[in-house]
Amino acid sequence: MNIKHDSRPIGIFDSGVGGLTVLKELIRTFPNEHFIYLGDTARVPYGAKSARTVERYTIQVADFLIRHNVKGLIAACNTASALGLGALRAHCDTPVLGVIQPGCQQAMNRIRSHNDQVGVIGTTSTIASGAYPQTLATFEPRLKVRSLACPLFVPLVDEGWIDHPATRLIVEENLAPFIENPVDVLILGCTHYPVLKPVIAKIIGSKTKLIDSAEAVADSLAVLLSQVILPAPSDTRQKVDFYVTDVADRFKHLAGRFLDGYRVDNVEMVDL
Ligand code: DGL
């Protein structure tokens, strides 16, 4: 093996299609890397499950990717990052990135002072875990963080109801606390939510900055590739392999929408 390069793939996983919002940014940023995406579509959603179950699922999906000889792992799911990352890091030697630390870093970059109001929205389990306020407190303990679970946003995105009157109504109803009492920065703490960004932005108003962690994850991967794992040779062509645990056709259909037209030719169904 060339000591400056490592052609092995990078594994990226989510409970389903949400992680594709992160993959989209990685495809844009890393033209030479080989990515393997696994969506656990048989067991989605993770967002209302217990820590014990999410830990078990996270380790199973990661083990599938590790068997594919990945050089690094990205948990492109907030729920898995909030509830399963500790167990995963204890389970394997492969370097692991989650989405919460990069998302909080991105939020901190947009905050003017500790007096700024920060909001976090996510799945029921992510919000209940307290992972966001805890991580933000490691940057600035004086920050006031208001968290809100928005579990209905995930099925709306899965159904492709992006610019639909019902979606606008549900978003408005759910985000009422942040409309009545606005925050300066709102973290989209679920990988499905960036798909609803235009609707959320319109309803929440232009004074609130929306934080989508996908870009920040790409920055963290760049750091990982320069400090911990080696990048693929610069003459390698990018490649993405897609795997799901159920209904591959539906995933393929949604993936086109999430990846803004990126061609998803082959989606293989696997048992974990
Ligand atoms: N992708 C998941 C997340 O970011 C949301 C979907 C689910 O509940 O599994 O939390």
Image: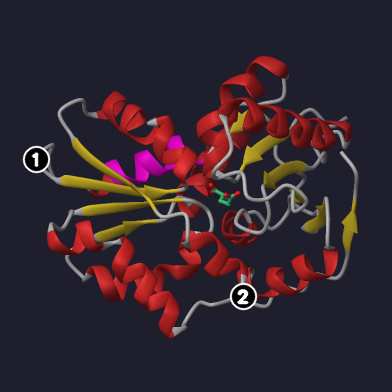
Residue corresponding to mark 2: 260
Question: Label 1 sits on what residue type?
Answer: Asn
Q: Quadrant of residue 232?
A: top right
Quarter assignment of residue 227: top right
Whether residue 227 is visible: no
Looking at the picture, how far across and down is residue 208, in whole percent? 21, 61
Q: Looking at this view, is 188 or 218 the one in front?
A: 188
Residue 88 on image: x %, y %: 66, 24
Tell me what residue is drawn at x 20 percent, y 25 percent: 141
Relative to 184, 43 lies left or right? right
Residue 189 visible in this rendered orientation of the protein:
yes
Residue at position x 88%, y 30% in the image: 1
Say whether residue 154 is left or right of residue 167. right
- Give the left or right position of residue 225, taking residue 63 as reference: left
The C terminus lies in quadrant: top right
Q: In the picture shown, does residue 162 fall above or below 58?
A: below
**What is the x, y in percent for residue 195?**
50, 68
